[in-house]
Structures are given as C-alpha cells and as structure tokens.
Image (cartoon, rainbow, N blue to C red):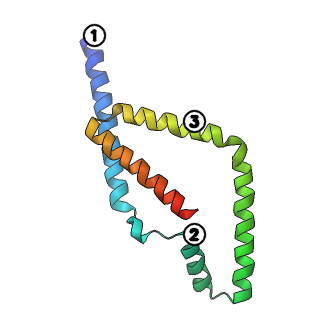
C-alpha cells in the first residue's frame, strides 16, 4: 500500500470514528432522558387525555391499537431473523472501530436499550 493510500485510509477511519462519536453525543443530548420517555401505557393515557376521550372511546381506541400492534407483529415474524442478523452485523462492525473504552460504553448502551425494550413489553 502506498503512503498516500495509507493516509487516505487513516483519514476515512478517523472521520468514521469522529462521526460515530458526534452521533452518539448528539443522540444523548437531543433525546430525552430515559425517565422522560413514556411507556406504551403512558402514551395511550396521554393520547386519551389530550383528545378528552370518553371511557367508551378509550376502550375502542385501545382495542384498535392492540389489533394494529398484533397485525404489525405478525408481519414482522417472517423477517425477524433477517432484521436481527442485519442489526447484529452492524453492531459488530461498529464495535470493531471503537477503542476498548468506547466499546465498553457502547455495550452498556446496548444493554440499556434491551432493558428499555423489555420494560415496554
């Protein structure tokens, strides 16, 4: 490899790592803290409150939303393994460009995200 190609590769790798770091920092600054994010139950309650739904309307809307989520889940079932594979590959590729310290933070972020997903279920 020529020196020029090596420098170009180093530049692109540095830009990728810097972009990742900026993206993570922006995400943490712009996304509301976990405590401020709403669960599905809280979002439905806010929706009902904002629209001033009656008890009957709220029951009907909850039924409609439950049916929608069930239908969407059924659509995703056949492609779930492919989605998981794509996500896993991306995570592995991201981990490969991180320093050990960054990797530790990234892995904690993944654990936190998984915990939040479990809380929503």
From this view, report whether residue 34 is shown above or below residue 103.
Answer: below
1 or 3: mark nearer the eye: 3
Question: From the viewer's perspective, is 8 left or right of 70?
Answer: left
* Residue identifier under label 2: 40
Characterize the local packing of mark 3: few (<14), some (14-19) or many (20 or more) Cα atoms within 10 angstroms.
few
Report the front residue among 113 and 1. Answer: 113
**x and y, in percent, of residue 115 in the image:** 47, 56
The local secondary structure at tag 3 comes to: helix
Q: CA distance from mark 1 to mark 3?
A: 36 Å
Mark before the other along the chain sequence, 2 or 1:
1
From this view, report whether residue 106 is shown above or below residue 121.
Answer: above
* Residue identifier under label 1: 2
Q: CA distance from mark 3 to mark 2?
A: 26 Å
Q: Quadrant of residue 41?
A: bottom right
Mark before the other along the chain sequence, 1 or 3:
1
The local secondary structure at tag 2 comes to: helix
The local secondary structure at tag 1 comes to: loop
**x and y, in percent, of residue 13 in the image:** 32, 29
Q: Residue at x 28, y 32 (%)?
A: 14
- Which label is found at residue 34? none
Q: Quadrant of residue 47?
A: bottom right
* Residue identifier under label 3: 85
Question: From the viewer's perspective, is 115 left or right of 29?
Answer: right
Q: Quadrant of residue 11?
A: top left
Characterize the local packing of mark 1: few (<14), some (14-19) or many (20 or more) Cα atoms within 10 angstroms.
few
Question: From the viewer's perspective, is 90 left or right of 102?
Answer: right
């Amino acid at each position: 490899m020529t020196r020029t190609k090596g420098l170009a590769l180093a530049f692109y790798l540095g830009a990728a790592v810097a972009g990742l770091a900026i993206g993570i920092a922006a995400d943490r600054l712009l996304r509301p803290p976990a405590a401020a994010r709403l669960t599905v139950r809280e979002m439905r309650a806010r929706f009902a409150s904002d629209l001033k739904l009656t008890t009957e309307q709220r029951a009907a809307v909850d039924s409609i939303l439950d049916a929608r989520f069930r239908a969407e889940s059924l659509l995703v079932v056949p492609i779930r393994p492919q989605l998981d594979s794509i996500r896993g590959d991306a995570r592995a590729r991201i981990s490969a460009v991180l320093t050990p310290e960054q990797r530790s933070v990234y892995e904690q972020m993944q654990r936190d995200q998984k915990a939040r997903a479990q809380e929503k279920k």
